[in-house]
Every structure is written in structure tokens, then in C-alpha cells.
Amino acid sequence: MYQVKLFNKISKVGLDRLDPANYTCSEDFDQYDAVLVRSAKLHDTKFPENLKCIARAGAGVNNIPLDRCAEEGIVVFNTPGANANAVKELVVCGLMLASRDIVGGIEWTKSLAGTPDIGPAAEKGKSKFAGPEIMGKRLGVIGLGAIGVQVANAAVGLDMEVWGYDPYLSVDGALKLSRAVKHITDVNEIFANCDYITLHVPLTPDTKYIINEDAVAKMKDGVRIINIARGELVDEDVMAAALACGKVARYVSDFASDAMLAQKNAVIMPHLGASTPESEDNCAKMAAAEIREFLEYGTIRNSVNFPNLKVPYEGGHRLCLIHKNVPNMIAQITSTLSAQGMNIENMGNRSRGDYAYTIVDVNGVPTDAVLDAIRAVDGMIRVRSIENL
Ligand SMILES: NC(=O)c1ccc[n+]([C@@H]2O[C@H](COP(=O)([O-])OP(=O)(O)OC[C@H]3O[C@@H](n4cnc5c(N)ncnc54)[C@H](O)[C@@H]3O)[C@@H](O)[C@H]2O)c1
Ligand SMILES: O=C(O)[C@H](O)COP(=O)(O)O
């Protein structure tokens, strides 16, 4: 029986994919084999020794200590693209919120409740909330991954002129991107030329404060910025000053902070990007499938800290080995197994940065002595023997 610790509320549709005959899910476990999480911060969480994997039902993994997990042989997954449509829809809404003062207008209209002749009174005040159309304006999309591509294509459909920047654009992303999107290779061109800028990069040490004093100084007066990606991508001191002087006409963000809530021209939402039943279900289903494939077969799919690897199972007993990516590991694994009298029926190996993953199917159930001998190989991080495969 595998125990799955829930650090956030996870859609039932996903939890239902974890067969109760083999899995129990709870928020209360101290010992657990797997974690299901959304945005809960795990940096200060001490993980139990039996934790094997963490599945983030969502895209951003900045809430998870990826390096520590890699060192401890804990595989971290996310669910690429599973909430991209939900975010794209909120960004389209964000373009409108960044244009006309829709929120201010709604609040003001509410304040008229009970006013005699409310219709004409509302008409009289509406010009305060007017703003430009997006058609024909230039939108800069920074980050062309699952979300950025969808946002860029949707904005083309709304007759915007779209510029896109992503130095690591994948082949898949390029194939999905509308040909009408102008590919930009220097982010400063986006800063200098766009009327609207939307952020779709992960939060990493490289992207923190991508919107900083230099970037804002290059921007057009009255630029409108949408940030449904992460609050820390924007230096809020800089943004507060830019909003106060009108350099940035409006900032639409999905991340609350006192500094931004104090700004008249900031529209702040409570991290609503992925909060649709469809995307919550999609993310939870994908995350549950990743946990099952890993715990039951050793397959790694959509990991953010280990290589992906699937070895078709054709019989034998499966060993899953997480180790350092250093010379001689495979030779040591195979020679250790053969010294213990075991034959390798099938195997696969992939590496990623400092780490590697090997799946070995052997011709019998390894004894504790065999497992201990493999554990003793220099550079080995974790040895798991899959029972009942
Ligand atoms: N508000 C929400 O609820 C919500 C929901 C989903 C995702 N997000 C955020 O959006 C981010 C992006 O999500 P995604 O699903 O598109 O992820 P993704 O991994 O598919 O795309 C990220 C893209 O950013 C690119 N990138 C990385 N560094 C870059 C840089 N310095 N400049 C330009 N591009 C760079 C990558 O090459 C990749 O194509 C997530 O990491 C998360 O922080 C927020
Ligand atoms: O990175 C993500 O997927 C989003 O920020 C969604 O976070 P949530 O699952 O906490 O809504």
C-alpha cells in the first residue's frame, strides 16, 4: 500500500485515479511514499526517508526544493500544459483589465446604488474609466512555453500584433506558434516597442525581477503589463514608482502583495490562473498518472529534476536506480549484479545534468545482499526494488 501525502486540496477526479486497493491519500501522514501538491511551499519541509516522488499538480515548481530533492533521490514531476488554457483565458481577460478601468468602473457603479436617475448618473461618469482597444496594439509575450504560445496565438486572433521572446523555445512550441507571431531574439526589443507585455516564464534565479528598473526605463510611456506567472518576476518597488508616475499605465497581476494593493493602477487577483474545474481536473489526473507510473513501473515522465525514462516491461524483477551522472556507474551496476549471479534481461539509462537514472530488469528476485551491494556502489543515491510487477 502506497501512502500519498496531500499538501493542498487536489481534485477528486485525480485522486480517484489512485486505486484505493493500492493507495491511501491523506493530509495527515508523517511517513509517505509520494506527495501531491499545488502551491504549498515545501522548502522548509523535512521529507521522510521513504518519500520517492513529488507530483506538482500544476506548472510552477518554485515552491519545491528541487536541488535537495535530487540529492535525496526524490523525483519531482509537474503537469506541463495541463492548466495552460485556463491561464490563457485569464490573460485575455487581463488584456481587457489592463486597457479600460473595468474594475474601477464596476466599483464606482456599485457606489451609485440608490442614486435617483442612476442610469444617467452612470453615463455621466463613465469617461473616467475609458481606455484603448487592444486591436492593432503590439503585445510582447515573454516565455513561449505551454501558456505563452496559447496566449500569443489568442492575441493574434484578437488582431493584436504579437511579438514573442523565448531563447529556449522548444520545437514543439515553435510548431504550435502562429506564423503571425514575430520571433524576437533580444528581450530589450520587447521592452522598447510593445504596448502590452505579458510574462510567461518560470520563476528561477535567472528570471527573478526580469521586470526591473532597466527594463522599465526602456519601455514605452503608458505600457501595460500583465503578470499571471509569478509575483517575484517583477521588482515591486520599481513597479510602484512606474505606476505612480504613469510610466506603466496599468499592472495586472495574479499575485497579492501590500505594495501592489496600494497602487491605484494595479489590478490584483488572488492567484486565479489555474482555478477552473477543468484545469484542476487535468492537473490532478496527470499528476496521479505520473505517481502511478513511477511507483508501479519506475517510469519517469515529466520530471523537472531527473531524466525521463520508460523501459517496456517484458518480465523479470525490476530495479530502479537513482545515481550520480559519473563515469563507470553502468559498469559497476552490471558487474555487481553479475558477481551476485544475476542476469540482466533488459535495461535503460538516461542522464540529466549531475544525475542519472537506470532501470534494470533481472532474472529473479534480488536478495538483500544483492540490493546492499548495489547500494554500496560509489555514487548510488537510491535503490528501489519494485515488488509485484
Ligand atoms: N497564475 C497561475 O495560476 C499560473 C498557472 C500556470 C502557470 N503559471 C506560471 O507560468 C509559468 C509558465 O508556465 P508554462 O506552463 O507556460 O511553462 P512552460 O515550461 O511550458 O513554459 C515556460 C517557458 O519559459 C521559457 N523561458 C525560460 N526562461 C526564460 C527567459 N529567461 N526568457 C524567456 N523565456 C524563458 C522556457 O523556455 C519555456 O518555453 C509557470 O512556471 C508558473 O510560474 C502561473
Ligand atoms: O504554476 C501553476 O501551475 C499555477 O501557479 C497554479 O497554481 P495552483 O495550482 O496553486 O493554482
Image: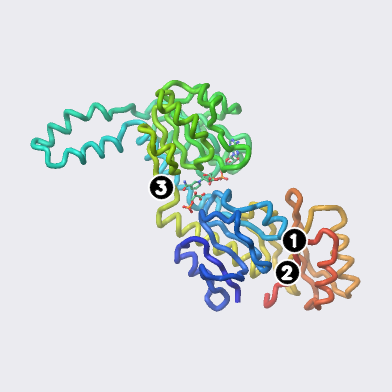
Q: Residue at x 22, y 30 (%)?
A: 126
Which residue is denoted by mark 2 in the rendering? 384
Q: Is residue 356 left or right of residue 278?
A: right
Residue at the right extreme, as displayed: 339
Q: Residues within 10 Å of mark 2 (few under 14, many from 20)?
A: some
Q: In the rendered structure, which amino acid carries the disc numbered 2?
A: Arg
Please name which of the two marks, 3 or 1, marks the residue nearer to the observer.
3
Q: Is residue 109 left or right of residue 278?
A: left
Q: Residues within 10 Å of mark 3 (few under 14, many from 20)?
A: few
Q: In the rendered structure, which amino acid carries the disc numbered 1?
A: Ile
Q: Label 3 vs label 1: CA separation?
A: 38 Å
Q: Residue at x 68, y 75 (%)?
A: 389
Q: Is residue 88 left or right of residue 380?
A: left
By what rule are the colours in the image chosen?
A: rainbow
Taking 213 as reference, is 208 above or below it? below
Q: In the rendered structure, which amino acid carries the disc numbered 3?
A: Pro
Q: Label 1 vs label 2: CA separation?
A: 9 Å
Which residue is denoted by mark 1 in the rendering? 322
Q: Residue at x 75, y 61 (%)?
A: 322
Residue 226 x %, y %: 44, 36
